[in-house]
Image: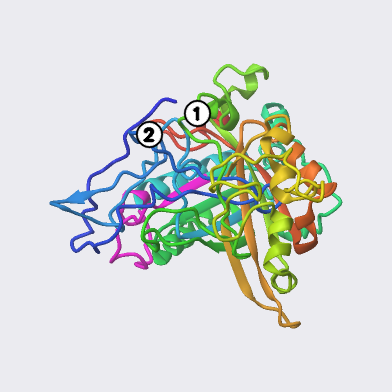
Amino acid sequence: MTESNPDIEISRRRLLGTVGAAGAAGLALGAAGGALAHSALADSGSGSAPGTPAPSTAGSLSSLGATKVAFQGDHQAGIITPLQAKGHLIAFDLTPGAGRTEASALLRRWSDTARRLMAGETAATSDSGIALDAGPSSLTVTFGFGHSFFERTGLAARRPAALDPLPNFSSDRLDAQRSNGDLWVQIGANDGLVAFHALRALQKDAGDAARVRWQMNGFNRSPGATGTPMTARNLMGQIDGTGNPKPSQPDFDKRIFVPAAGPGPAEHAWMAGGSYAVVRRIRMLLDDWDKQSLAQQEQVIGRTKATGAPLTGGTETTEMALDKLGADGKPVIPSNAHARISAPAQNGGAAMLRRPFSFHDGIGADGAPDAGLLFICWQADPLRGFVPVQRKLDRGDALSEFIRHESSGLYAVPPGPRNGEYVGQRLLEG
């Protein structure tokens, strides 16, 4: 994979950096195909891939807040960037009468703002001052286009077939008002104020060109919260992130990013180096889950809760022995266990890079938490990544009893911008 070097100059605004971990580079990532499943992006390879933070240094100290992520690169930031502590997802629809000209101007404004904020600078106009005391804190801003964007901008001929709507799944309970959208933005940072500052700035930048369709907030374990880097746990208490494809693997780019010379028509070449994001709000029925015994929970997942190791033994990273039988003659990892059904080996090698946020939106009238997973997965082709795995989960995953898919979206995320370019320029001006 072609590498570029993120800006490592310490923010000029970061005069007094807080002493802490130098970013989340050691953290594994995770989440689920239908909800949980394999992950872990953390890679031991040297160098900085595009979109990964490079720790800024001042003397012998490093600062979590001073860590920057490059805006420019082969791929947009926020795809292979290590998971951040805070996140916001927001979708916009172009306003009536807005088309390609307005969309181009909007993406130019958004790109300028994202570039500035990711470098630890203030927004160009009407900065709110929310993050004046903080550095960039590994801020990333990622932009994508929904299926409807192409009709709205007169670019239907340039819409890739991979962006065709996802099929219906029997377990879906989707809210149309919190699904899809012309434009999608993912914001991540290791500081809550920095993340909200970016959200607010981009919302103001939308002006009269686009209106908010839906917005969701998420979180993850903070970098440095554990004594040593380790895979995070989700809100079910499960270690969630073990088998994500890693950048060091020879087929990583082929699985995650659209090839430069793909099989599609020339008018789709603007997506070369881009990726497709499937976004699902997955409610976890935590009260029902917590009523299960530890043994029952482990049978549902197919892994031990304490270590994440497969029920067939070993450690978290040990391969599952799917053919192993117990004394009762039954598979040690049940046939409907989530880990078994979602395993790449059980799905023709289908793989996706899972990069989620957990969410908690309060307590409902019934006393149950409205909480779960903002599932985000990345792949070169969702018909070969997310769709086959979700179809299989939909037919018999033991975890389905404890989760509810409440919203969904699929977005074409173009490649990273070149110097002086705005995100999506190759589509909108090509």
Q: Residue furthest left?
A: 59
Residue 357 appears in the picture as rendered:
yes
Viewed as shown, does residue 405 lie left or right of 56? Answer: right
Viewer-nearest residue: 136 or 96:
136
Q: Position of residue 205 (x, y in %)?
A: 48, 55
Relative vertical location of residue 401 with respect to residue 397 in this rendering, above or below: below
Query: What's the residue at 51%, 43% (across, down)?
Result: 107
Circle number at residue 351: none
State how the image is colored. Answer: rainbow
Viewer-nearest residue: 313 or 418:
313
Quadrant where the N terminus is found in the figure: top left
Please provide the residue range marked out in magenta.
Answer: 118-142
Q: Amino acid at mark 1?
A: Gln
Sequence order check: which comes first, mark 1 or mark 2? 2
Relative vertical location of residue 145 with respect to residue 428 in this rendering, above or below: below
Q: Residue furthest front?
A: 327
The CA span between labels 1 and 2 is: 10 Å
Q: Position of residue 368 (x, y in %)?
A: 71, 78
Q: Which residue is the site of mark 1?
A: 249
Q: What kind of element bears circle 2?
A: loop
Q: Amino acid at mark 2?
A: Gly
Q: Position of residue 281 (x, y in %)?
A: 68, 58
**Residue count near mark 1 (Cα–Cα under 10 Å), binned few <14, some 14–19, many ≥20:** few
Circle number at residue 45: 2
Viewer-nearest residue: 69 or 339:
339
Viewed as shown, does residue 9 lie left or right of 212? Answer: left
Residue 74 magenta: no
Task: Tell me how many marks there are.
Answer: 2
Q: What kind of element bears circle 1?
A: loop
Quadrant assignment, res 18: bottom left
The rendered magenta stretch, by its main secondary structure, is classed as: loop
Residue 122 magenta: yes
